[in-house]
Amino acid sequence: MRTADTRAKVKDDYRPSRDEILRYIAENPDRSGKRDIAKAFALRGEDRIWLKDVLRDLQDEGLLTKERKRLARVGSLAHVAVLDIFGRDADGVLLAHPTEAVGNGEPPVIAIRVSRGGGGGPTPGIGDRVLAKTFPTDDATGPAYTGRVMKIFEKRTDAVLGVFRVLQDGTFRIEPVERRQPELVVDKEFQNGAKNGDLVEVEPARASRYGLPRAKVLAVLGSLTSEKAVSMIAIHAHDIPHIFPADVIAEAEAVKPATLAGREDWRDLPLVTIDPADAKDHDDAVFATADPDEKNPGGVVVTVAIADVAAYVRYGTALDREALKRGNSVYFPDRVVPMLPERISNDLCSLREGQDRPALAVRMTFSADGRKLRHSFHRIMMKSAAKLAYRQAQAAIDGAPDDKTGPILDTVMKPLWDAYAVVKRGRETRQPLELELPERKILLKEDGTVDRVVVPERLDAHKLIEEFMIQANVAAAETLEAKRQALVYRIHDAPSLAKQESLREFLQTLGLSLARGAQMRPNQFNGILDRVRGADHEGLVNEVVLRTQMQAEYSPSNIGHFGLNLKRYAHFTSPIRRYADLIVHRGLIAALVFGAGGLTQDEAERLEEVSALISATERRAMAAERDTVDRLIAAYLAERVDDRFDARISGVTKSGLFVQLPQYGADGFISVSSLGGDYYIYDETARSLFGERTGKGYQLADRVEVRLIEVAPMAGAMRFEMLTDPKPLPGSKRSFHKAKGRARASQSRPGSRGRRR
């Protein structure tokens, strides 16, 4: 095997075999870009073109996948990954699994390397969750990877959540939230004031030889009829830090307000905040005007000011360590688990109307066709001229100004909308991926239970702020790149070739073609969506196109943002609620010599670790928010068992159908065994289940009628019965018979079986 260490000995006419290339990539995950591979094998000139073709062939064959700018074996573990340590091998070596799925098979086992003497980083133990660098091994019989621990996450306590139950005989039980946990007995002296139906945190005792294990109640979190208790389940289940340590609170309370020293005075500029009506923190403000430069007719100047969080949260402090551990704020229907204490997030850093606040501002000049011509960053002191809500701002533009928007209608509001019209032209030219996905909002009653679920109207006011923030984020990335300053990018990779091929096969079942060839661009996906607009399968195609996309994440290496169709992108505009933005602020302060609070060299060297951590906390927050909504809606609908609902098929599997209730945004399951009347076969390409005898069935995004037959509020789960008859499915007979053939081949293998009613 030739590597970079032996490339000087490689003959000029040597070309590595496919196996050697694959082995090199597996053994060198941190040096697996095209340039790295060419350098390792001393390939130059035409040989580099040959290598590019070979790598593309390996991707087409499904042997390689592209992750950022690096290539990786399909199903391989990321070079930096979050791991759970579950045990030891016969030699006492710690073993771990990745917290997230890798490929479709069994999770790989990672042997954790621990330096003797404790000098090689933190020392983990069984049960710990760690961030580690991983390296593949050549051992075919042992663990597939070794791992070097970079960080140990906060250790989990022995406390568990459960529902306090009082039985008819007066004894107490704990009904666990997690199904894998046993029921627990609570003695009266350990009741701690808990009442029947309370959500409690308990500490299990050691199990006795006979009977159920015992526990004592540590805290009463609330009644299950209260929504706040439901969000606490998700907070606990996903290990979200929600109580600030005493040293963090003390540090926040001791912070003094920033002064004008070292800042530009912009307090006379009428910047305004436009946010949801119930927003408590305001981290961005905007202003716009026509460009006075005669050389830029029809152009505009847009100013975006963002709270200067770096002025208060310095690297290495208790505030900073806690913010990094949280990674981001988490938003539930009734509460926010903030990244920063209220003294910082809702007070000193919130751009309150009429109060002096420190900020980082970017002033951007656009041509009449929406192209950004130039921009400049400034560290300022500002004073918000008005705190506005989205609907309030939109109403002013639509002809219904109020006491607050009326006086600034001509000087502030109309110039903002004029500037948005210009910037929007640039967006239309750029052609980002345009997926209109409705966002539902749960409205609560005074007692904290669900009142109703609404889909807020998407206003131009929302789009204006969104596009201004995108442009500010681009400007931040461009400035940091130009200054050669390390940063964390917000990256979004293009769909893999395998996902593109899956989409192509699916579209063929609908009689739609998609040419093979080079990597698709966002405008090509938009073209697909345009072709089905108004058609019966519009919703289906939108759903499949969405599932074809990769997940955005953070990285110190740039690959661009596919969905936004941008070559470089970073998060700059929400440092109160995202740690990634705080890093970008610190980078700008350092690069532009804006004074104290800049990115340190030590911090810059840890950006790969930090990127992996905050990507993981973002996914954690999304899962917790989703779980809470599921539990809320399940509890809300628990009294409507046997009711009928209009639904939409949101997922198709071999075992059945997932259906979503559009009115509530909640999902439930229909078992394939309950469909009846036929033997149903799963067609992965067409995202459908169809009957072997009739050829009729159900497909992703179909609109159906269902009956609710069972609800488990604690698990956020609902089970439905299908009331709509199966329909003839779109697609050719050829794909129909191919699916049947695949299913029969699967059923002929040992251990496989179908379902029949």
Image (cartoon, rainbow, N blue to C red):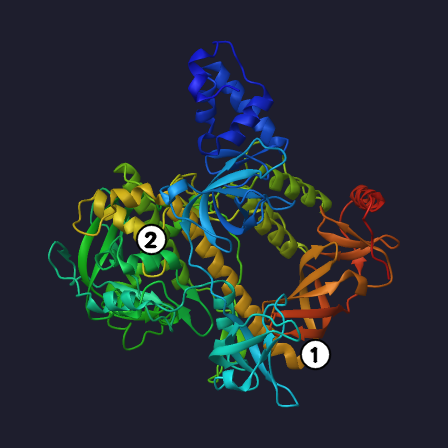
Q: Secondary structure at mark 2?
A: helix
Label 1 sits on residue: 641
Amino acid identity at mark 1? Val
Q: Residue lying farthest left?
A: 261
Q: Residue lying farthest right?
A: 693
Of 152 and 248, nearer the camera is 152
Q: Say which mark, if any, is on residue 581.
A: 2
Q: Residue lying farthest bottom?
A: 169
- Relative image position of residue 419 (x, y in whole percent): 32, 55
Q: Is residue 267 left or right of residue 587?
A: left
Q: Say which mark, if any, is on residue 324.
A: none
Badge 2: residue crowd in 10 Å (few <14, some 14–19, many ≥20): many
- Relative image position of residue 608 (x, y in whole percent): 39, 43
Question: Does 30 sit above or below residue 395?
Answer: above
Whether residue 426 appears in this view of the structure is no
Q: Residue at x 35, y 42 (%)?
A: 119
Question: Does 258 sit above or below residue 53?
Answer: below
Question: Does 1 sit above or below residue 186?
Answer: above
- Relative image position of residue 47 (x, y in whole percent): 50, 16
Task: State if disc 1 and disc 2 touch (CB < 8 Å).
Answer: no
- Relative image position of residue 166 (x, y in whole percent): 60, 86
Whether residue 682 appears in this view of the structure is yes
Amino acid identity at mark 2? Asp
Q: Is residue 625 left or right of residue 482?
A: right
Of 390 and 16, nearer the camera is 16
Badge 1: residue crowd in 10 Å (few <14, some 14–19, many ≥20): some
Question: Does 244 sit above or below residue 481?
Answer: below
> Of callouts 2 and 1, which one flags the residue occurring earlier in the amino acid sequence?
2
Of 125 and 505, nearer the camera is 125
Q: Indicate the quadrant where residue 485 lies.
A: top left
Distance of mark 2 from mark 1, alpha carbons? 45 Å
Q: Indicate the quadrant where residue 145 lies.
A: top right
